[in-house]
Image: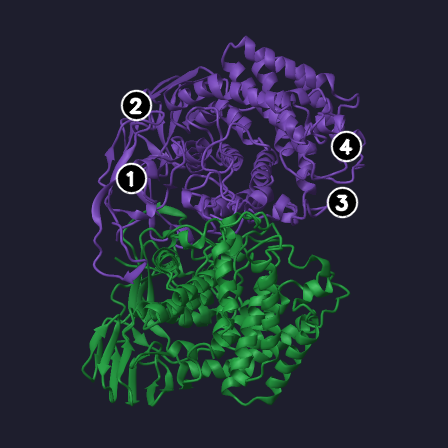
Chain colours: A green, B purple
Amino acid sequence: MDFSFDNVTIRGGFWADMQKKNREVTIPAVYERFSETGRIKGLSCCRFEDEPEAPHIFWDSDVAKWLEGSAYVLAKNHDPALEALCEEIIDTIAAHQWEDGYINSHYTAVEPDKRFTDRSCHELYTAGHLIEAGVAYYCATGKDKLLKCVERFADLIDRLFRIEQSTPFLTPGHEEIELALVRLYRCTGNERYRDLSAFFLDMRGNNDKDAPEIWGLKASYTQSDKPVRELSDAVGHAVRAGYLYTAMADMAAISGDEELRAACHRLYDDIVNRKMFITGGVGSSPRGEAYTVPYDLPTETSYAETCAAISLAFFSQRLLEAEGESKYADTVERILFNGFLSGLSLSGDAFFYENPLSIHLRNRVKDVSVEHGDRFPIVERKKVFGCSCCPPNVNRVLASLERYVSRTVGDTVFIDQYTESTITGDGFSVGVSTDYPVSGEIRVSCRGVGRLGLRIPGWCREFTLSAPYKMEKGYAVIDGPGEATLTFDMTPVLYGANPDIIDCAGRGAVMRGPVVYAYEGVDNGGYIPERYRLSRDLLPEVGDASFCGIPTLTVDGEFIPDRDELYAPVGEPDYRPARVKLIPYFAFANRGPSDMAVWISLKD
Amino acid sequence: MDFSFDNVTIRGGFWADMQKKNREVTIPAVYERFSETGRIKGLSCCRFEDEPEAPHIFWDSDVAKWLEGSAYVLAKNHDPALEALCEEIIDTIAAHQWEDGYINSHYTAVEPDKRFTDRSCHELYTAGHLIEAGVAYYCATGKDKLLKCVERFADLIDRLFRIEQSTPFLTPGHEEIELALVRLYRCTGNERYRDLSAFFLDMRGNNDKDAPEIWGLKASYTQSDKPVRELSDAVGHAVRAGYLYTAMADMAAISGDEELRAACHRLYDDIVNRKMFITGGVGSSPRGEAYTVPYDLPTETSYAETCAAISLAFFSQRLLEAEGESKYADTVERILFNGFLSGLSLSGDAFFYENPLSIHLRNRVKDVSVEHGDRFPIVERKKVFGCSCCPPNVNRVLASLERYVSRTVGDTVFIDQYTESTITGDGFSVGVSTDYPVSGEIRVSCRGVGRLGLRIPGWCREFTLSAPYKMEKGYAVIDGPGEATLTFDMTPVLYGANPDIIDCAGRGAVMRGPVVYAYEGVDNGGYIPERYRLSRDLLPEVGDASFCGIPTLTVDGEFIPDRDELYAPVGEPDYRPARVKLIPYFAFANRGPSDMAVWISLKD
């Protein structure tokens, strides 16, 4: 694999359970939905009677992400049935590749004379996902049929876009191919792909050929308003942005380009200090599925697309790999346990595209006279979407969690994410035993390791480590490690938000370790969350492990009783002491529609 | 006049100033806008080159409301220029009335063969406003040209709708004519108009001929989902609802129909106990400009159309006149000083259609990538709207404030609204001297009055009255009154909201007397309101009388300082003591775009 994968085995615990669910439920479910909706059949570039636009412009990318996820599964698991499905898909793609290398079921079937004429039509994005799938499948299985196909496709793109510059636009409307080409370069060693990626990055917002607007949206929607090295504010479509920033970080690492590196740091800081939900979700507005302005983090209408959280995890992981600072791994962890995982139902077969931070069911039935409601996120997960980018993205991230577990830098093995796992390498091995984040106890056992770096998460206020260590970039580094036990204090913590976030005023959010908690009406008498206030001293009681092993919490607070008056002078409050039950945020909306809130009113 | 008007003179103080502004600025400004936009010219039933639909279906109603307002002005003021404009309008309307009595510039000019074919097209609504104008102009000036016109029009409607029932629908899509016909009946004594009004009320939601849906909206949008006597929940378009409920109250008073009266009481209770903003605004949602569900009173997107507040004032006043309970006058007062008056700029020539209870400018620039924002209310008043129903409605309400000042029941003169005024009648007169609501001191001086009832407002916690009295239905009633001084405690009061109103959780609103106050960023460092918290002990300081004589307030609170972190554990708050400046809500958005809030976070 082009990243740390083969040398990591996730053996048990929370993420192993998730990977099992992904293999056994989610990947088959997504395949089934893709079959039903024509996405699989569409690969053979056929027309559909009732859908003149099908195969749709992004269908190939959906299947490619599913294929990439399946490749990671096959790398770790013997599964002939899954492999047969993958082979069939690859054969179909190969059979319909053009002589000159072009692949795209929509353009091949529907408008072959229009290929590479419309910057907004996701062709290069789709190419990027095919390339990632080709690389992953080759690394996983050693079979290079798809890899060869995508190399030929990339060669064609390189010739038309970079060498001849004969296309009517120069950079993709939807980024993705840039990071994919870096992977193709790393997999094949062919510098042409690195150069093409660099070309796309360098030309972006920096040429006269690209249409500045897409679908009537400003150039910033596609991060095309200025050259990438000048970017400072995360703007525009959040998934596009995240994939672009990821490629920028990749390229900065490859080329040592300090300007590009500095831009990455500015963008990362802008996101995590001003534009990220506490869940790691990003993209505040459904309009343009976009980043907006600092501190604009509305809870009820938060867009926070699952794919956008994933793209920020990619970007953060690249920065971690480049810089080695634990804060980047903290962001990856925040996303994985919260804003990413909320995208998947507990049953494993239904998905959120948007991940709101509060639900008031009243807002969904608000208008008794009008059929159609405001644009609010849905309140229960769906099995498939018209634009179904998120489900296969969940597939591939869950199947490749190994990437995030560990890095080896010189003689130091860093443990970035804690899960029951084994890390091996040139003459060394590390065993990690833990039920984290159920408890905060992690036992490590090393053989042949020079130094071991254990991430001390940013959320952790106290920890003990049984071996001598020194802190380096947020890691407790042990020289010549053997056995050691690291214990994090998992006492639930009440968080406040920056006072410039309107919707969080006077409210707090509870986290236990990396897991953000949420209120649901179904656990608390069916009331709107505003009927409760949390005590600043939570007096938490850890409950049963109902949600994928993660415990519920019951915390201290008070209940605001009914009142007849609509408005009345503020008198002595008659709040009643109450306990408030909270569940892990990622598990919300799994028990039917319910009011929900991450941010809950606080007593002084 | 068909209501208490001629015997009341508003001599000075707050409302006299507003009436002066209305005469000198607002009425001329609205006329000018109506000239510019073709509404005046359209009365001659001409076509417009660039606007195939003009004269629009509701243009006549806009002018009719302006004419009604001007009539009230002429009743109290010598103004030959204004009278000439009115006469010209009346002559034009009369000249284009059909032989059979029909009046409507749109149908006459654009689609004469389609008249009375489409329930959604505001013909009867427009007829209603013409009737009100005809009645008002006759009562004000003694000239009956327009009255005769509208009688002929009403006769036609009565024949087609009630007697022959030859029209393809039986009740108006937009209510208004019901209450207008009651006025016409009271003015002319012709019972035919009372019966037609009763017919429209009885048939509503009670026949198979009316299209249940209008513009794809459910029957409840037009209050046509059930017979009026069965109504319990205020639903649908808030202006339509308010005009209907007003007519229901009128008819209940005329007929003594207890079922109708009970329905009015259920509807009123539903509104003031569950669906009214603290400003007296109603209609929570821009979708359908409608009432929604109980406690759905969002501050940022509150629709609270100026006309809807007016319609609730009408309904409340009818109930006051029927029941004599002060709570109805309280609602009228709440509306007049707040949710109605906010519709007019301090300059007198610009208007809000919607009256939000909070503004965060960030929400208006939220999306940096997309041209068009969410559907939020505008942040500065406009001189005219495409649908310009509110401006002339402001004209007619300001010009007829006399209606709300006093009622005489038997030998008792009730003072319902306090303003510098003289009330005269059969052998009696009452002089009211006050700068209310600048101060709470009211001096009354009576001659020939049997009993005097002085409203003790619901907001008033303490008062003194220099004469002996007993309380009746919320009024302090003095037997054989002479001179007396009534003094209300005007100490600002902090109000809380029902805990089921999501947006008011943990917040308070300040009122001084009947006036609701608001925070504006421009007075408080440009910060979002959430950066401040109010103390429960307001320690108020009454400031200068910058806004139409109403003082600003400075109250106690604290400021939440900047913080770098987006999220951090809740520690000891480092809030700083601060004073918070508040202005009368009705005066918000008069100094350029600014953040605004009525509901402000509270300290415990």
Residue at image mark 2: B484
Q: Residues within 10 Å of mark 1 (few under 14, many from 20)?
A: few
> Given contact means CB atoms under 8 Å apart, are the residues at marks 2 and 3 in contact?
no
Residue at image mark 1: B525
Between disc 1 and disc 4, the foreground one is 1
Q: Residue furthest front?
A: A163
Mark 4 chain: B
Residue B144 versus residue B37: which sits nearer the camera? B37
Please identify the quadrant where the C terminus of chain A is shown: bottom left
Q: Residues within 10 Å of mark 2 (few under 14, many from 20)?
A: some
Residue at image mark 3: B209
Residue at image mark 4: B115
Between disc 2 and disc 4, the foreground one is 4
Residue A318 versus residue B32: which sits nearer the camera? A318
Q: Is residue A126 left or right of residue A574?
A: right
Say what amino acid the circle numbered 4 marks. Arg
SS category of the residue bearing label 1: loop
Gap between marks 1 and 4, in whole Å?
A: 57 Å
Gap between marks 2 and 4, in whole Å?
A: 58 Å
Sequence-wise first label, 2 or 1: 2
* Residue B489 seen from this side: yes
Gap between marks 2 and 1, in whole Å?
A: 45 Å
> Given contact means CB atoms under 8 Å apart, are the residues at marks 1 and 4 in contact?
no
Mark 2 chain: B
Number of numbered discs overlaid on the protein picture: 4
Say what amino acid the circle numbered 1 marks. Gly
> Given contact means CB atoms under 8 Å apart, are the residues at marks 3 and 1 in contact?
no
Sequence-wise first label, 3 or 1: 3
Say what amino acid the circle numbered 2 marks. Ala
What x and y, as percent, mark residue A372? 60, 53
Gap between marks 2 and 3, in whole Å?
A: 58 Å
